[in-house]
């Protein structure tokens, strides 16, 4: 993730992104699904909740553009920049300053009433607005996220070692997954929600019924291929089928070879001997050395 270092100065100073910037409109968009994507069946895969439907970048940006049109009806002369998890801005810090939530020990932004299953988007403006106040809250003595993380990525309260995070390993990492971490990944093939799943602020309560309430955004409706799919079915996919199944989906971020690698690790963690014929078949047709190594690892685990 070297791009973070390259844009560090701009992230810390919105003026470098939009000269004359005076305000940031920060919004949250609920992505919690009505159906849980989690399964105890090790032969089926798990996708992170935000990746079950359409690409959130596109869904959120459409909404932000509509909001910007509304703003320009009142201030047609204003200059603006719209970002959704892709620009050189400190999204979570801006969201905290805007009062959307506070930082949990898992480093996620948590809203006391709604939990943490929400996406962020921003509009930088060169006009002054009436400003909100930062959000305050806390985890208290709770360490559930730290204790639940299978790879030990939350090395201390509020400190995440991204190199050990399943989300990083399955999405951003382009090379081989460290062998010592593979067994800890289970059947999660794109992203990970474990530190959010165990968080008390994501459990509905009588005084907070909106926690984990299903999203009303049609674009986030889960696809059949992302709801507990059979791992061997995913492994049999060819590249064209992958591109078709995950068109306009966040999953394409992993790239074809990364997706194959992730599925191979999950199949290996299933220890399912019935998967051996499929693994053998895929090994014979696979030419990428990195993917082949993961397929071979999976075969050893399933024997």
Image (tube, rainbow, N blue to C red):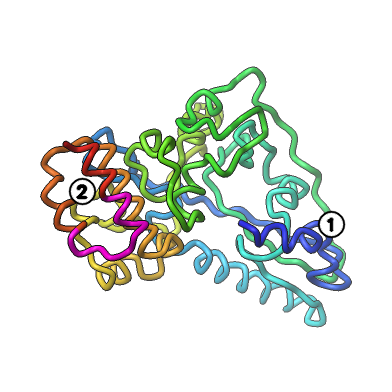
- Spot the residue most to the top: 141
- Residue behind mark 2: 230
| Front residue of this view, candidates 55 and 209 | 55
Residue 145 against residue 248 in the figure, above or below: above
Packing grade of label 2 (10 A; few <14, some 14-19, many >=20) is some
Q: Determine the residue positioned at 51% across, 69% down.
A: 58
Region in magenta: 284-295
- Indicate the position of residue 129 as horizontal and vertical percent values: 84, 61
Please name whichever residue, 131 or 108, is drawn nearer the observer in this view of the structure. 108
Q: Quadrant of residue 46?
A: top left
**Which residue occupies 75% across, 34% down?**
136
Q: In this view of the protein, can residue 287 be seen by the observer?
A: yes
Residue 294 vs residue 184, the one in the foreground: 294
On whether residue 150 falls in the magenta region, the answer is: no
Look at the image and tell me in which quarter the N terminus lies.
bottom right
Residue 34: x, y in percent? 36, 45
**Which is more toward the observer, 160 or 164?**
164
Question: Which residue is at a point 49% across and 54% down the rendered structure image?
Answer: 173
Q: Quadrant where the C terminus lies?
A: top left
The CA span between labels 2 and 1 is 51 Å
190 sits left or right of 271 in the view: right
Indicate the position of residue 32 as horizontal and vertical percent values. Answer: 45, 46
Mark drawn on residue 130: 1
């Amino acid at each position: 993730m070297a791009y973070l270092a390259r844009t560090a100065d701009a992230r810390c100073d919105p003026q470098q992104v939009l000269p004359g910037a005076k305000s940031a409109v920060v919004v949250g968009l609920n992505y919690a699904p009505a159906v849980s994507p989690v399964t105890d069946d090790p032969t089926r895969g798990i996708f992170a909740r935000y990746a079950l439907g359409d690409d959130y970048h596109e869904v959120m940006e459409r909404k932000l553009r509509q909001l910007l049109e509304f703003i320009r009806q009142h201030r047609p002369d204003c200059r603006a920049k719209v970002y959704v998890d892709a620009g050189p801005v400190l999204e979570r810090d801006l969201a905290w300053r805007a009062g959307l939530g506070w930082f949990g020990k898992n480093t996620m932004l948590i809203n006391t009433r709604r939990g943490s299953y929400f996406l962020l988007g921003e509009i930088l403006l060169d006009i002054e607005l009436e400003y909100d106040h930062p959000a305050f809250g806390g985890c208290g003595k709770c360490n559930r996220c730290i204790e639940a993380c299978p790879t030990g990525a939350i090395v201390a309260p509020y400190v995440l070692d991204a190199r050990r995070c399943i989300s990083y390993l399955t999405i951003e990492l382009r090379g081989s997954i460290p062998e010592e971490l593979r067994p800890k990944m289970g059947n999660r093939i794109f992203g990970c929600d474990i530190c959010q799943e165990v968080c008390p602020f994501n459990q509905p309560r009588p005084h907070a019924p909106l926690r984990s309430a299903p999203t009303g955004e049609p674009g986030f409706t889960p696809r059949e291929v992302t709801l507990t799919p059979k791992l061997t079915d995913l492994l049999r996919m060819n590249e064209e089928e992958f591109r078709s199944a995950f068109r306009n989906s966040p999953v394409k971020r992993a790239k074809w070879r990364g997706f194959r690698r992730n599925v191979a690790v999950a199949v290996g963690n299933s220890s399912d001997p019935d998967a051996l014929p499929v693994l053998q078949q895929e090994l014979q047709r696979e030419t990428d050395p990195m993917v082949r190594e993961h397929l071979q690892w999976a075969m050893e685990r399933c024997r």
